[in-house]
Image (tube, rainbow, N blue to C red):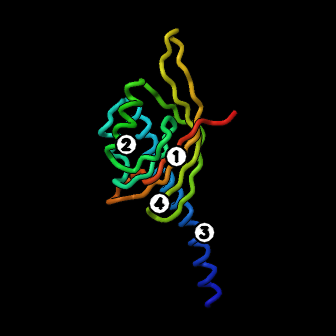
């Protein structure tokens, strides 16, 4: 009887938990997709709201670490002024807890050039997403130019 219970429990864990964890990863990544859309729109206030108040950001085009909302706004204001756009690429995610997911991957930044052809900067990213009051927010964001 105990063995039957254990086998049933293990089966339930194997069948039920992985899809639930996959859903968390997908939900968290959907927030990254919204971040990309918002970044491309240049809506600085909306971008800032996507981060936790104590988020740590190592931006692609900044030599400094950003950890204050006002500094984050200034960073994204400069990106919007430069007319930067981002296009998401391949990614992978790992669930850290029910309310925390780490996502790493690649994206390309582009900006208009004088000759009309965009300048593309391949980059890589990592995000740590945390769920606060039912909403996925960015707690950590690292971005750097992708080595050749």
Dot 3 or dot 4: first in sequence order is: 3
User: At 36% across and 46% down in the image, what residue appears?
Assistant: 50
| Quadrant for the N terminus in the image | bottom right
Dot 1 or dot 3: first in sequence order is: 3
Q: Residue furthest left?
A: 45
Location of mark 1 (residue):
142
- Looking at the image, is mark 2 or mark 4 nearer the viewer? 2
| Quadrant for the C terminus in the image | top right
Location of mark 2 (residue):
72
Judge by depth and name the residue closer to the eye, 116 or 145. Answer: 145
Q: Secondary structure at mark 2?
A: helix
Q: Residue furthest bottom?
A: 1
Q: Position of residue 135 (x, y in %)?
A: 35, 54
Location of mark 4 (residue):
100
The local crowd at label 3, few if under 14, some if 14 to 19, many if 20 or more residues have their Cα within 10 Å, is few
Distance from disc 1 to disc 3, alpha carbons, whole Å, reads 33 Å
User: At 60% across and 68% down in the image, what residue appears?
Assistant: 14
Dot 4 or dot 1: first in sequence order is: 4
Distance from disc 2 to disc 1, alpha carbons, whole Å, reads 13 Å
Q: Secondary structure at mark 4?
A: strand
Judge by depth and name the residue closer to the eye, 124 or 56. Answer: 56
The numbered dot on residue 14 is: 3
Q: Secondary structure at mark 3?
A: helix
């Amino acid at each position: 009887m105990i063995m039957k219970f254990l086998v049933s429990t293990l089966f339930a864990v194997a069948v039920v938990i992985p899809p639930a964890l996959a859903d968390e990863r997908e939900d968290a990544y959907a927030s990254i997709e919204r971040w990309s859309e918002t970044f491309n729109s240049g809506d600085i206030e909306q971008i800032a709201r996507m981060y936790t108040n104590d988020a740590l950001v190592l931006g692609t085009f900044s030599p400094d670490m950003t950890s204050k909302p006002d500094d984050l706004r200034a960073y994204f204001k400069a990106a919007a002024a430069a007319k930067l756009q981002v296009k998401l690429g391949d990614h992978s995610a790992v669930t850290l807890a029910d309310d925390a997911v780490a996502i790493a991957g690649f994206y390309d930044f582009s900006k208009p050039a004088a000759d009309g052809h965009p300048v593309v900067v391949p980059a890589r990213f990592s995000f740590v997403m945390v769920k606060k009051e039912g909403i996925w927010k960015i707690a950590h964001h690292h971005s750097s130019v992708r080595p050749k």
